[in-house]
Image (spheres, rainbow, N blue to C red):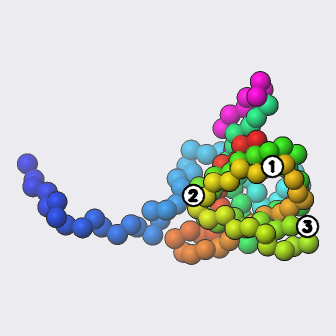
Amino acid sequence: MTETNLSRPPAPPSPTAGLLDQSNVTWNTLEGFDHVWYHILKVDPDAKTVDLLLKFAANQRILLHRHHADYSTLILQGELRLYDASGTLTEIRPTLSFVEKPAGGPRTAKAAATSTASPGSAIAAPTA
């Protein structure tokens, strides 16, 4: 049996430690929605809700859109930046931020290129 030195500090995280393993995620696209991919987690017809993952390309704004229902979002990786219809930055959502928002818009969003450890895409888990 090997002894373990419990007083030794843990090793620093690897450069990819903060990246989400996406090897089991099938990303889909919607025609007309460039720079964003989705993966459906759950559809609840009775509650009329959809739980999904969204992946945003770095430094590329998505189509101007409007939310027609209240929603909540958890940012799993990266940083998501939101802009109003005039292009003014209105909100920055960092990794592990959670928001609940009422329907509204119009708005657009893009992922920020943050560092070499996070290559710039943002992954969010919104529900409506």
Q: In terms of sequence position, does the residue under pointer 1 or pointer 2 come before the other? A: 2
Q: Which residues are magenta?
A: 38-47
- Residue 59: tell me if it is visible: yes
Dot 1: element: loop
> How far across and down, in percent of the image, does residue 54 sit?
70, 52
Q: Which residue is mark 3?
A: 85
Residue 108 image position (x, y, % from top left): 83, 63
Q: Residue at x 16, y 60 (%)?
A: 6
Q: Residue at x 69, y 39 (%)?
A: 51
**Which residue has dot 1 on it?**
102
Q: Nearer the viewer, mark 1 or mark 2?
A: 1
Circle on res. 82: none
Mark 1 crowd level (few <14, some 14–19, many ≥20, 10 Å Cα): few
Q: Position of residue 50 (x, y in %)?
A: 74, 37
Say left or right for 40 vs 103: left
Question: Of the residues shown, which amino acid type is indicated by label 2?
Answer: Leu
- Residue picked out by circle 2: 96
